[in-house]
Amino acid sequence: MTDPFDKCRLCTGSKCCTYITQHIPAPRSLTDFDFLLWQVSHQGVSVFQAGDGWFLQFEARCAHLQADRRCGIYETRPQVCREYTNDWCEFDEQAEKHYKLHFADHAALDAYCRKRFRRWDARHAPERRSA
Ligand code: SF4
Ligand code: SF4
């Protein structure tokens, strides 16, 4: 097992500084999942369920991550960065995923919804066409 103090030195991607997550209410209905489907249709947006709930993930490299993989504002970095530990982080994630569910894109979420909801394909009311 890797010494946790060596992880950040060995970690070449600095993955923890290249995305943000946003906690969201657990989706339940057809409408909830249809809305998520719109969100994950955008490049760099994914959704996952972990032990502590559902989250949107946005791939977005932090502007303060320097070429040498150090934080450019280390002394004044935000609290969320200060509280983050490498006890279990993306470095470990490469070997063992912590997701219960993970949908990287529209196709993955659509396939899941198709299995979860019998009426998935019929969820949209017939569209009215103007004369
Ligand atoms: S906390 Fe984890 S993901 Fe972030 S730099 Fe260290 S080892 Fe890499
Ligand atoms: S502020 Fe620093 S520690 Fe926080 S995400 Fe950006 S580079 Fe990483």
Image (cartoon, rainbow, N blue to C red):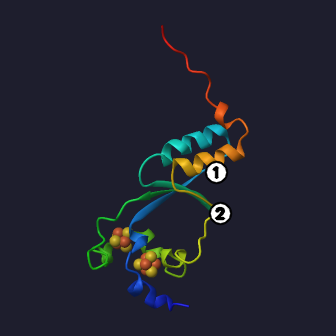
Residue 27 visible to the viewer: no
Label of residue 79 in the image: none
In the rendered image, the quadrant that contains the N terminus is bottom right
Q: Nearer the viewer, residue 46 or 70?
A: 46
Going by the numbered disc 2, the residue's amino acid type is Lys
* Outermost right residue: 118
Residue 40 x, y percent position in the rendering: 50, 48
User: Nearer the viewer's eye, disc 1 or disc 2?
Assistant: 2
Residue found 50% across the figure and 42% down from its top: 38
- The residue type indicated by label 1 comes to Ala
* Image quadrant, ligand 2: bottom left
53 or 125: nearer the eye? Answer: 125
Horizontally, is 116 left or right of 89 in the view?
right
Q: Where does residue 37 sit, x and y in percent of width and height? A: 54, 44
Q: Residue at x 49, y 74 (%)?
A: 90
Q: Residue at x 66, y 43 (%)?
A: 114
The residue at which mark 2 appears reads as: 100
Observer-nearest of 101 and 88: 101
Check the image and report above or below for 53 versus 42: below
Give residue 26's mark: 1
